[in-house]
Image (tube, rainbow, N blue to C red):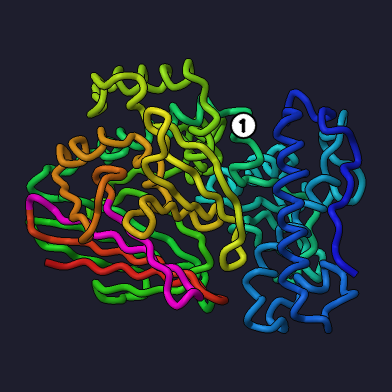
């Protein structure tokens, strides 16, 4: 028997003002429904799993046929997580628990307030899309954790008690004005947030990546360009060329070997999390819903920061607008296509996969991934801006016109996988960075190469 979308236990407007009606309608009726539809489609080729509960399926992903495992992991997890999510909320609900749960929380975390702070931090520090959880293990021990994408704690043998959806579709409609402003601020001010900032002659670029691995909890790698020489170190002692297989859990911070850094913690994180719990919010979709007045507000924010759009003097009809035009499933991910419209005519198109934050522009010619898709939507202004920081961006052959300054391009590999590549060339030292992201049947691959 096919899975069905469960009815909400309350009206769409019941959670106002905390969650607005439109967000609930789209979140439940479109996003959750898409997970159910795609899950049923994936299971059509595995009739031996018919009649199994969603909990049993998600708990036994490793036993599924490899060809559908990724699709069921994403969509089955999405169905299970959201079915649980609707049940833990309600009008007039909330507050401190009582009884055995209250005692267990106090014993484990010290107090209910301490638990709330830890739970909020789990959601706010989940880089990219995912969930924050309060779970118990087989022994009854409580734990606060987070999972990437639609991964469920049920897969790890844990029982969820409370879950919070920190995917951008859970909140971005309500916070779209602040989202745009924060995305803009992050994009243009991050290079200045290294404290103290390294001298240009000493460090061209420094950052770190944390990735969950299948057989290890995490690995920290730091890439630093000093006097034109690129070096990389990580906890595993791996060389400069680092290849890792990820679960899609990535945390980017700026770091240098002097231990000065920008990290997503403390008051800055709390302020950002108010409107932007996930730094990988789908700005393209937000932009598509902007009114002319809201676009003027964004232009005004750019002007305040001294950023002049390359087409600032062009007629109004020359300004690009992104319009959602199509959705479909690719490799188990719900993908969306946006048309870039200029002067009433389509001039480019983009496919995006929300789970992996890969956006493709101009067919196979350019793409932006993760944090960069916020920068890319500043269009022509970002090329000169990034060059002012000492970077040049090499263009792949055949690159026509698209998003200036971010030459990532995506290819299809034999119809079974997609692959994105980006090359960053330093103007000051001759060093380079090449990053590759690939997703196929049952796997994700990230590759980072640095050198001269």
Q: Residue 425 in the image: state x and y as whole percent.
A: 16, 56
Taking the image as shown, residue 188 lies to the left or right of residue 323, namely: left
Q: Is residue 202 magenta?
A: no
Along the line of sight, the residue nearer the viewer: 146 or 330: 330
Quadrant for residue 15, please give it.
Answer: top right
Q: Is residue 159 above or below residue 195?
A: below
Q: Residue 104 in the image: state x and y as whole percent.
A: 81, 52
Q: Main secondary structure of the magenta part?
A: strand
* Residue at (44% x, 52% y) in the render: 359
Highlighted magenta segment, given as a residue range: 407-428
Along the line of sight, the residue nearer the viewer: 4 or 112: 4
Q: Residue 66 in the image: state x and y as whole percent.
A: 63, 82
Check disc 1 and report the residue beneath it. Answer: 173
Q: Is residue 322 above or below residue 69?
A: above
Quarter of the rendering occupied by the C terminus? bottom left
Along the line of sight, the residue nearer the viewer: 146 or 99: 146
Q: Secondary structure at mark 1?
A: loop
Taking the image as shown, residue 196 lies to the left or right of residue 286, namely: left
Quadrant for residue 422, please give it.
Answer: bottom left
* Residue at (86% x, 66% y) in the render: 2
Q: Residue 423 in the image: state x and y as whole percent.
A: 24, 60
């Amino acid at each position: 028997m096919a899975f069905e979308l469960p009815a909400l236990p309350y009206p769409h407007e019941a959670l106002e003002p905390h969650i607005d009606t439109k967000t609930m309608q789209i979140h439940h009726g479109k996003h959750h429904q898409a997970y159910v539809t795609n899950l049923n489609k994936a299971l059509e080729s595995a009739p031996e799993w018919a009649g199994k509960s969603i909990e049993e399926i998600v708990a036994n992903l490793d036993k599924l046929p490899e060809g559908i495992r990724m699709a069921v992991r994403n969509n089955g997890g999405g169905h299970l997580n959201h079915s649980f999510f609707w049940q833990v909320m309600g009008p007039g609900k909330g507050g401190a628990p009582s009884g055995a749960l209250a005692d267990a929380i106090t014993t484990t975390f010290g107090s209910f307030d301490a638990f709330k702070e830890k739970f909020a931090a789990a959601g706010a520090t989940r880089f990219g899309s995912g969930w924050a959880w309060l779970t118990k293990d087989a022994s009854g021990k409580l734990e606060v954790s987070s999972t990437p994408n639609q991964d469920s704690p049920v897969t790890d043998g844990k029982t969820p008690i409370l879950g919070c959806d920190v995917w951008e579709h859970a909140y971005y409609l309500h916070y779209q004005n602040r989202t745009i402003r924060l995305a803009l601020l992050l994009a243009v001010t991050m290079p200045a947030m290294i404290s103290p900032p390294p001298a240009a002659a000493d460090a061209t670029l420094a950052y770190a990546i944390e990735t969950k691995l299948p057989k290890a909890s995490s690995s920290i790698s730091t890439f630093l360009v000093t006097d034109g020489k690129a070096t990389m170190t990580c906890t595993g002692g791996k060389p400069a060329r680092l290849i890792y297989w990820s679960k899609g859990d990535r945390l980017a911070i700026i770091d240098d070997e002097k231990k000065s850094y920008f990290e997503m913690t403390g008051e800055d994180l709390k302020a950002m999390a108010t409107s932007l719990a996930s730094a990988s919010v789908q700005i393209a979709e937000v932009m598509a819903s902007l009114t002319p007045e809201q676009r003027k507000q964004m232009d005004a924010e750019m002007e305040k920061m001294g950023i002049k759009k390359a087409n600032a003097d062009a007629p109004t009809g020359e300004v690009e607008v992104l319009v959602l035009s199509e959705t479909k499933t690719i490799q188990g991910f719900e993908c969306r296509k946006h048309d870039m419209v200029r002067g009433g005519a389509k001039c480019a198109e983009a496919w995006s996969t929300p789970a992996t934050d890969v956006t493709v522009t101009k067919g196979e010619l350019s793409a932006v991934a993760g944090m960069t898709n916020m920068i890319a939507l500043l269009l022509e202004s970002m090329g000169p801006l990034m060059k002012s920081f000492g970077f040049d961006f090499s263009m792949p052959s055949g690159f026509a016109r698209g998003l200036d300054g971010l030459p990532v391009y995506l290819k299809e590999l034999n119809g079974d996988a997609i692959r994105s590549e980006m090359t960053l060339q330093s103007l000051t030292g001759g060093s380079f960075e090449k990053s590759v992201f690939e997703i196929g049947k049952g796997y994700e691959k990230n590759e980072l190469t640095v050198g001269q």
